[in-house]
Image (spheres, grey):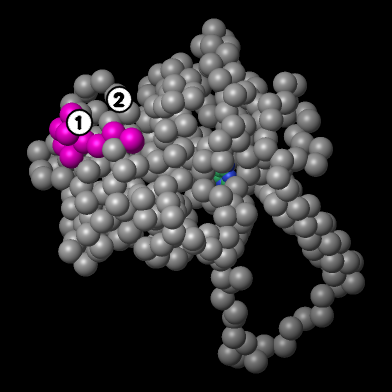
Amino acid sequence: MFRRKNKNVKNLVLQPVSVTGYNNNLLQQQFDNKVEDSLERYIHSTVHPSWIHDLDNMKLETVRPIGQGNGGSVTLVRYNQIYMAKKTVFVGSNVKVQKQILREMDVLHHCKSPFIVGFYGAFLDTNGICLCMEYMDCGSLDRILYMGGPLPCDVLGTIVVAMVKGLQYLYNVLHIIHRDLKPANVVVNSAGLIKLCDFGVSGELINSMAETFVGTSTYMSPERICGENYTIKSDIWSLGITIYELATQKLPYAGTDAEEEPAGILDLLQLIVHEDPPRLPDTYPESLRLFVEACLQKDPAIRATPQQLCTMPYFQTALTTNVDIRSWALQYKI
Ligand SMILES: Nc1ncnc2c1ncn2[C@@H]1O[C@H](COP(=O)(O)OP(=O)(O)OP(=O)(O)O)[C@@H](O)[C@H]1O
Ligand SMILES: [Mg+2]
């Protein structure tokens, strides 16, 4: 849909395609169409992922690669008629640690929220630990932001509600902190659902990933940078930075023009800790500016709790506004 059409400017004559090649292409196309049809049906069915105990690579058919992050890669796979996003994370070769991670993943058994990506299971393979989760066919918000620019106000409101409700589910039901909230870890599907993924379910996994950490720091709270304890409030800071980015398509601390980015990671950390926190410009609605301001308080004691965020006018209005998220999401279907 986003592919640019090439003009035949030199009037080149196209060579006829060989009959075998044509048939192969046709067969491939028919196969791809079948996959897309069944994928579509699957995404729109009401099935909530439930834990499958005996998952392993032998039972999974690879459909296509999805993406690559700092900590691992994600692939679309199929198990019988079920489509899943398989994330492989390198966790080192210590078997005790690997087993501990798997045990901790069991919490996900009980994870049933429309705001949290569903899980099918986890297993070890030679490349690390494989997490099989619900496939979200419109991808993550960083991709959507890149393709579509700043999010429309009403869509942003619905997404903020989903993110806050997702965080509350993690805190109140699963008793875990997210630890890596950012647009790349909020995923969307063509049924119009917005869900959080890649939260810190396993302490061991967090430790082993920290050893090889090369990730983004832009979303890190000042107290986390200063080495203090990570709490729910640190997630709320990351939420504020995420909303700022979704509303403006810019990262705070980057300056007004793209050339003005902080020179390096140490400069960025200095800015987060020592400068005034980012604020949305006056051109944005006041209720949104106040919401972001409540998240981006440098002192965690003053920063809003999730419950306080839920009582704010921005959240309350978004909660009661009817937004056609499905049509919006469909534009970004992969
Ligand atoms: N459940 C999912 N459904 C569909 N796409 C997904 C899913 N999970 C991840 N992705 C896609 O795969 C990409 C890579 O994900 P991954 O979590 O490995 O990296 P990341 O979140 O971009 O960065 P980091 O490694 O710093 O966390 C994401 O940007 C997203 O577009
Ligand atoms: Mg991720």
Kind of residue indicated by mark 1:
Pro
User: Residue 50: which quarter of the image?
Assistant: top right
- Outermost residue, top side: 96
Callout 1: helix, strand or loop?
Answer: loop
Residue 212 visible at all: no
Q: Secondary structure at mark 2?
A: loop
Dominant secondary structure (helix, strand or loop) of the stretch shown in magenta: loop
Residues in magenta, as a range: 297-307
Q: Is residue 62 above or below residue 224?
A: below
Q: Are marks 1 and 2 in contact (CB under 8 Å)?
A: yes
Residue 85 is situated, as x and y percent measured from the top left of the image, at 63, 40
Q: Position of residue 190 (x, y in %)?
A: 61, 56
What residue is disc 1 on?
Answer: 300
Quarter of the figure that contains the C terminus: bottom right
Q: Nearer the viewer, residue 25 or 282?
A: 282
The image position of residue 202, as x and y in percent, is 48, 20
Position of residue 114 relative to residue 292, above or below, is above
Whether residue 300 appears in magenta in the rendering, the answer is: yes
Residue position for label 2: 231
